[in-house]
């Protein structure tokens, strides 16, 4: 007799079951090990990417470029100066599109938005000189971007903002993104080797950062909000943090006051501004001491 006697007629062969409470140990353990393995293995950068066709507004070439898959990358916060951070990928690297044939490049969002006059400027000043990656477009496009490549492409985009006489804010924001890319590159290098000499890269980061600071200040005197997709308080806060990081404490303080006194600023922005204000006060005290 057994617990399951009488069930043979249903086709079950259950003679082997002695203890119904016994856990099938070996299998369970194997399962656990597999689950742990799956969690530890980080996703590869290419899993976050998707190739999309874009059409160059300057030379009409239709080509593929890398974009971040919608909803795939998980945002894990931001640096104080609003540089976004995502888990397992620096999405900033892919926020640029460049035409492999004529050399026109831009931050992704504005790539196709070019007036005829601007397209002519790019054609006359970029395309005629561009000695680029004409051949082999299809086989280089599938790769992930290194920081070097992303920075180079953003620099090309910055050159195009000058040539096409873009708004000051677009030039400034492109500079800000380049400095953020240097920061990402530095973090990447230091994660692998904490002793590595990154002083040259740090200089580059700060050079573009300073350009961004000057450009953003100029933009608010010339343009109407939203500027670079930001309302007045967000941009004031951004300029304040950039000023702070550049050691310009008085200027930082001035821009923060505008945020703190604003009647329309979001609570979260005000809180961040108050937090930074306290740090600035402490830093000023330290400088005097
Ligand atoms: Zn083109």
Image (cartoon, grey):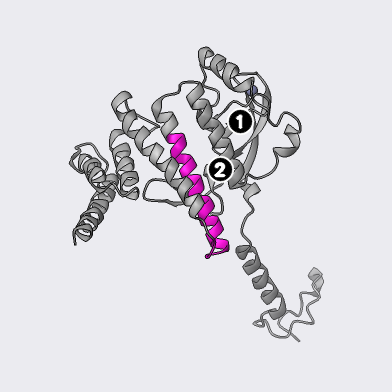
Q: From which residue to which does the magenta span run?
A: 173-196
How many residues crowd around disc 1 within 10 Å: few (fewer than 14), some, or many (20 or more)?
many
Asked which secondary structure carries label 2, the reply is helix
Q: Is mark 1 within 8 Å of ligand 1?
A: no
What's the magenta bit mostly, secondary-structure-wise?
A: helix
Q: Is residue 70 left or right of residue 282?
A: right
Structural distance between the alpha carbons of marks 1 and 2:
13 Å
Query: What residue is shown with label 1?
Result: 98
Does the rendering let one see residue 75? no
Q: Quadrant of the C terminus?
A: bottom left
- Which residue occupies 78% across, 82% down? 16
* Numbered tag placed on residue 93 in the rendering: 2
Give percent across and percent down for residue 74: 51, 50
How many residues crowd around disc 2 within 10 Å: few (fewer than 14), some, or many (20 or more)?
many
Give percent across and percent down for residue 80: 36, 50
157 versus 247 height, above or below: above
Q: Assign ligand 1 to one image quadrant.
A: top right
- Which residue occupies 29% across, 43% down? 240
Asked which secondary structure carries label 1, the reply is strand
* Numbered tag placed on residue 108 in the rendering: none
Give percent across and percent down for residue 60: 65, 18
Is 177 included in the stretch rendered in magenta?
A: yes
Is 263 included in the stretch rendered in magenta?
A: no
120 versus 177 height, above or below: above
Q: Say whether disc 1 or disc 2 marks the residue closer to the N-terminus.
A: 2
Q: Quadrant of the N terminus?
A: bottom right
- Which residue occupies 43% across, 42% down? 207
Does the rendering let one see residue 140? yes
């Amino acid at each position: 007799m057994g617990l399951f006697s009488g069930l043979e007629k249903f086709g079950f062969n259950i003679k082997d079951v002695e203890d119904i409470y016994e856990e099938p140990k070996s299998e369970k353990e194997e399962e656990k090990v597999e689950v742990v393995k799956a969690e530890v293995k980080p996703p590869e950068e290419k899993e976050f990417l998707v190739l999309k066709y874009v059409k160059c507004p300057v030379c009409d070439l239709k080509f593929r470029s890398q974009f971040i898959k919608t909803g795939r990358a998980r945002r894990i916060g931001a640096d104080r100066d609003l540089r976004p951070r995502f888990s397992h990928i620096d999405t900033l690297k892919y926020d640029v599109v460049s035409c492999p044939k004529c050399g026109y490049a831009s931050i992704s969002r504005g790539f196709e938005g070019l007036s005829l006059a601007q397209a002519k400027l790019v054609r006359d000043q970029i395309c005629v000189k561009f000695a680029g990656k004409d051949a082999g477009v299809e086989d280089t496009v599938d790769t992930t971007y290194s920081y070097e490549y992303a920075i180079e492409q953003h620099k090309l985009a910055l050159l195009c903002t000058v040539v096409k006489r873009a708004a000051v804010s677009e030039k400034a924001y492109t500079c800000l993104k380049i400095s953020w890319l240097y920061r990402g590159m530095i973090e990447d290098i230091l994660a692998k080797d904490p002793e590595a000499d990154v002083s040259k890269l740090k200089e580059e980061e700060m050079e573009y950062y300073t350009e961004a600071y000057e450009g953003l200040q100029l933009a608010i005197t010339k343009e109407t909000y939203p500027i670079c997709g930001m309302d007045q308080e967000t941009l004031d806060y951004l300029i304040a943090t950039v000023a702070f990081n550049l050691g310009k404490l008085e200027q930082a303080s001035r821009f923060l006051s505008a945020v703190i006194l604003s009647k329309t600023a979001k609570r979260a922005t005000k809180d961040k501004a108050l937090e930074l204000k306290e740090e600035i006060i402490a830093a000023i005290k330290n400088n005097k001491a």
